[in-house]
Image (tube, rainbow, N blue to C red):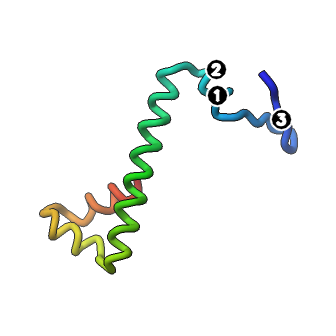
Amino acid sequence: MKENKLKGLKVYTLDQVFKKQGSEFKRGYEEESLRLTLANQLKAARLKRNLTQTAVAKKAAMPQSVIARIESG
């Protein structure tokens, strides 16, 4: 496994990590990446429409805290 050194730290590419950790790790990483992407898209859409989390929560019939948790990933 090729290693790059950065101030005494070993730096690995994602492919190197996936190869070492296996397919279950890669699947989990990809799922989490999709969740974070969706959370960022939802927040961007809310901000583009100048809506507060409270306003979105009312429209979705859920507490504002749920919107905050969704947006935080």
Label 3 to label 2: alpha-carbon separation: 16 Å
- Which is more toward the observer, 71 or 27? 27
Query: How many numbered discs sit on the rendered protein?
Result: 3
Q: Residue at x 64, y 29 (%)?
A: 15
| Residue under label 2 | 20
Q: Residue at x 44, y 40 (%)?
A: 32
Residue 52 position in % (x across, y down): 30, 76
Task: Give the class, few, some or many, for how many residues have Cα within 10 Å of label 3's Cα (few <14, many ≥20).
Answer: few
Q: Residue at x 29, y 77 (%)?
A: 51
Callout 1 touching callout 2 (CB < 8 Å) = yes
Q: Give the residue at mark 3.
A: 4
Mark drawn on residue 40: none
Q: Marks 1/2: CA distance?
A: 5 Å
Q: Are marks 3 and 2 in contact (CB under 8 Å)?
A: no
Cβ atoms under marks 1 and 3 closer than 8 Å: no
Please name the amino acid that badge 1 sits on: Val
Is label 1 in a helix, a strand or a loop? helix
Helix, strand or loop status at disc 2: helix
